[in-house]
Image: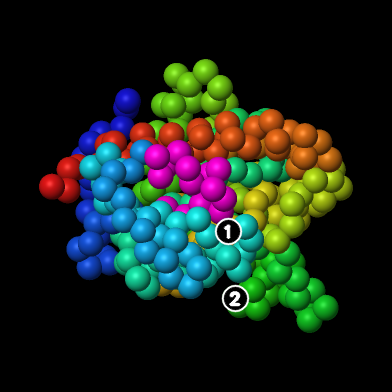
Amino acid sequence: MTIKDKSIGAAFCDAAAVIGGNAKLGIVCAMDVEMQGLLDAMRGVSVEEIYGFKFYEGVLEHTKVVLVRCGIGKVNAARGTQLMIDKYKPSYIINSGVAGALNVELRPMDIVVGNDFVQHDFDLTPLGYAKGNLATGDRSKPTVVKADEQMVALLTEVSRDISGRHEEAGTVTVGRIVSGDQFINTPELKAALRDDFGGDAAEMEGAVLAYVAGCAGVPCAVLRVISDMADGTGNESYRVFEQKASKLSAEIIIELVKLAPSQN
């Protein structure tokens, strides 16, 4: 492993100082299959249910963690993320899971670390806004939300290390993730999202999670493993790779927290 303990230690401590000294990692997953590997690896787990969301607090390696399955889609991601921030005040939030490939060079089991995010289905074009513009800022461009640069660098390095020694892991791309309440599964829509937004991967939660976290001042990152090609072969590919891709995404998060300094 090329990443240094002090690098991730500084990242967690810097975030904790901003949030108020509570060094805790929040992890949001949309589905049980994406969450299960992380939950299985946690120790000392306690569960609290708030408005239908189950929050799991415990220790992952030696890092305090709060984990939630928010459910599929942007509204669910927004609700789960805001509740986590309000109740548990995490120092960082990471969204872990699977996505469809928009970049034609990506294949199932390739890893995408989100550098920035766009909500592709937010459409006020009849009012003179660009597609993806949230009625804020320059109306001629989509609204772009950026991930935390420090966590992007850490996730990228850990992902590349795992990719180099994991038999099924593919390449690592740092790029744009686009989100919308739609499972992308036609070549035409895939090409449009690539052309309109420069998206590398498409899913249904990351962009709004990043937006909510950003509004609350919580640094966040989004990690995705490709489960399907988003081109009409999606249903078959998704069934084959959903569990493998989810497991790999969880393994990367676990490998990352191994490098955090002990909080004892």
| Three-letter amino acid code at the position of disc 2 | Gly
Is residue 22 a member of the stretch shown in magenta? no
| Three-letter amino acid code at the position of disc 1 | Gly
Counting every numbered tag in the picture gives: 2
Q: Which label was assigned to residue 224? A: none
Instruction: State the image coordinates of residue 239 (x, y, percent, origin top left).
Output: 70, 36
The residue labelled by disc 2 is: 137
Instruction: State the image coordinates of residue 242 (x, y, percent, origin top left).
Output: 63, 37
Is residue 29 a member of the stretch shown in magenta? yes
Q: Which label was assigned to residue 71? A: 1
Of residues 54 and 153, the one drawn nearer to the viewer in this rendering: 54
* Whether residue 100 is situated above or below residue 181 in the rendered picture: above
Residue at position x 26%, y 48% in the image: 44
- Secondary structure of the magenta portion, mostly? helix
Determine whether the residue tagged by mark 2 lies in a helix, strand or loop. loop
What's drawn in magenta, residue-wise? 26-40
Residue at position x 40%, y 54% in the image: 67
